[in-house]
Image (spheres, rainbow, N blue to C red):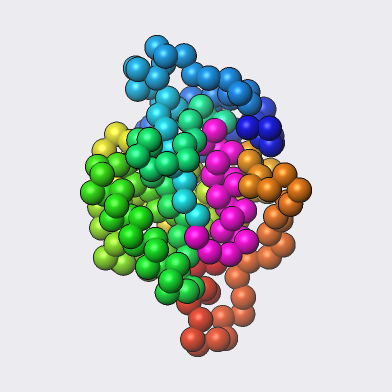
Amino acid sequence: MDDVEDLTAPPPPRPPSSVVLPHRVRAPGDELSSAGASAGGPGSQSIFLKTYGCSHNISDSEHLLGLLTSYGYNIVSHMDDADCVVINSCTVKDPSEAAFINVVNKAKKAGKAVVVSGCVPQADSRHKALAGVSMLGTHQLANAVAVVEESLKGNTVRMLSQRGPLPSLDLPKIRRNPYVEIIPLSTGCLGNCTYCKTKHAR
């Protein structure tokens, strides 16, 4: 991966938890040792990430990739090769939501650990497709590693609080396009559009 940014930056603050996760940085192109992978230790597993929605969601996924890669996880291109499936979801348009539901069901059927992030769990945490899967809210990106770790252990985690500041812009990041940098300039709205669901997620 030639476009890894800030992988040597200090780890983001972790939420209060009894789980202590080591911060591991892997240089681009380095491979984990076979001993570490076979031991199934933290960061030795493979992650498949699927993104739906707007540019803000794409930016969030770039941060998710950066965080997970900086801890040593291997990012794969196919769900079949993954130990954990992370789905960054969109709730604004029905086609995106329907596609996300199909991926969640496929991952569950394959016996994968599943983490759903983005607008669907933030806006509608009681959505029937979210039963039995871990959830990561739009304001909780910095906690992605903790949620993935617990999900791989077989636990179901929900981090959906909107309290506190937005995730820092200096989180580790892997850009989807080497020529395009997505920088979220604002979030939220006045909340005056009665038909809009985005205000519940962002």
The image quadrant where one finds the N terminus is top right
Q: Residue 99, located in which quarter of the rendered image?
A: bottom left
**Nearer to me, 120 or 21:** 120
Q: Where does the magenta region start and end? A: 52-69
Residue farthest top in this picture: 35
The image quadrant where one finds the C terminus is bottom right
Q: Is residue 62 above or below residue 198?
A: above
Residue farthest right in this picture: 179
Rendering coords of residue 200 (x, y %): 48, 72
Q: Main secondary structure of the magenta part?
A: helix
Q: Residue 152, located in which quarter of the rendered image?
A: top left
**Nearer to me, 6 or 51:** 51
- Report the number of numbered marks: 0
Residue under the point 34% across and 47% down: 114
Residue under the point 54% across and 44% down: 64
Residue 117 visible (yes or no): yes
Is residue 6 in the magenta section? Answer: no
Q: Is residue 76 left or right of residue 168?
A: left
Rendering coords of residue 86 (x, y %): 42, 47
Rendering coords of residue 190 (x, y %): 61, 80
Q: Is residue 69 left or right of residue 135?
A: right
**Nearer to me, 63 or 170:** 63
Residue 20 visible (yes or no): no
Is residue 53 in the magenta section? Answer: yes
Rendering coords of residue 73 (x, y %): 48, 30
Residue under the point 62% across and 75% down: 189
